[in-house]
């Protein structure tokens, strides 16, 4: 089977992240992480599916999306990575997850890189970020973001977007690492938001972007 350029690009980004750890800069105080791609071809392992479910249940959010993520990966519009940290003896258990989305047909301002021409552009979204409580506040999320920004640039993305519940501390965290809000709109279903124990104002999401070219 002949691979399209898109398939090759996506295989390259996946292999690079999984197989070639990013070297640490001398004197770096950020955590030493490794991103392991969620491999779904020919089929994902049961262990990986269970791990994803565990994380989505832990964050109370979107475990129903796992089959859709699998299809998006297979069609070349999404990547999902498990986040590990490296120790002198190997990798830790999974510390969390992160995803790169290359085409959001419902909102091209979020991700348009794999949109059909002439809509295709350079926007990709970092999302589905989750870190287990015991691994938090060590800079792991920020380190994973930096790695994904680098990988996105390598495949030609020019802008990274993120979105998060608007009344959240997370907005300020993203601003601190160079993201700027470009819109705010209603995104989450009231039922889901109430189910998470939050109030109606959390239905709104802030959309932020960062130029990386
Ligand atoms: C939001 C989230 C991803 C952050 O992950 P994290 O790995 O703890 O993030 P970081 O460590 O990079 O940064 C978190 C904070 O720790 C601080 N920090 C980083 N390294 C630190 C260190 N060595 N010592 C102390 N603090 C540190 C950061 O400055 C940051 O501070 P802030 O809260 O004032 O912004 C994580 O808390 C999470 O998964 N939360 C749940 C997400 C969720 O449920 N989302 C809903 C949809 S799934």
Image (cartoon, rainbow, N blue to C red):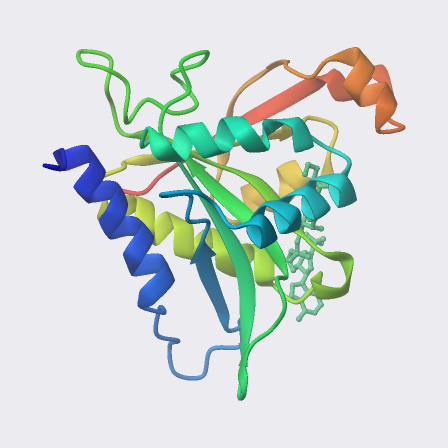
Is residue 188 found left or right of 14 in the rendered image?
right
* 59 to 104, vertically: above or below: below
Is residue 77 found left or right of 162 in the rendered image?
left
* 79 to 95, vertically: above or below: above
Is residue 72 found left or right of 57 in the rendered image?
left
Report x, y in % for residue 99: 48, 42
In terms of depth relative to the viewer, which is nearer, 59 or 154? Answer: 59
Res 130 seen here: no
Res 61 seen here: yes
In terms of depth relative to the viewer, which is nearer, 99 or 72? Answer: 72
- Residue at point 47%, 78% (across, down): 28
Q: Quadrant of the C terminus?
A: top left
Is residue 84 found left or right of 205 in the rendered image?
left
Report x, y in % for residue 131: 66, 54
- Residue at point 54%, 29% (across, down): 67
* 128 to 83, vertically: above or below: above
- Residue at point 43%, 55% (across, down): 146
Report the label total. 0
Ligand 1 quarter of the rendering: bottom right
Q: In which quarter of the image is the N terminus?
A: top left
Report x, y in % for residue 10: 26, 42
Q: Hey, which residue is sitting farthest left in the picture? A: 2
Report x, y in % for residue 66: 58, 33
In terms of depth relative to the viewer, which is nearer, 141 or 43? Answer: 43
- Residue at point 69%, 40% (across, down): 56
């Amino acid at each position: 089977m002949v691979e399209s350029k898109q398939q090759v690009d996506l295989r390259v980004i996946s292999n690079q992240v999984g197989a070639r750890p990013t070297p640490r800069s001398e004197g770096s105080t950020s955590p030493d992480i490794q991103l392991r791609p969620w491999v779904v071809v020919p089929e994902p392992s049961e262990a990986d599916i269970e791990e994803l479910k565990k994380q989505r249940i832990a964050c109370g959010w979107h475990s129903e999306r796992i089959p859709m993520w699998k299809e998006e990966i297979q069609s070349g519009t999404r990547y999902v990575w498990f986040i590990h940290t490296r120790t002198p003896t190997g990798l830790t258990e999974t510390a969390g997850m992160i995803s790169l989305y290359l085409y959001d047909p419902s909102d091209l301002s979020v991700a348009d890189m794999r949109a059909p021409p002439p809509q295709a552009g350079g926007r990709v979204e970092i999302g589905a970020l989750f870190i287990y409580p015991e691994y938090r506040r060590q800079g792991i999320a920020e380190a994973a973001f930096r790695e994904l920004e680098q990988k996105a640039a390598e495949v030609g993305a020019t802008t990274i977007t993120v979105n998060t519940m608007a009344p959240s501390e997370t907005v300020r965290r993203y601003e601190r690492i160079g993201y700027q809000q470009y819109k705010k709109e209603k995104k989450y279903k009231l039922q889901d938001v109430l189910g998470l124990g939050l109030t109606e104002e959390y239905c709104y999401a802030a959309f932020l972007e960062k130029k990386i070219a």
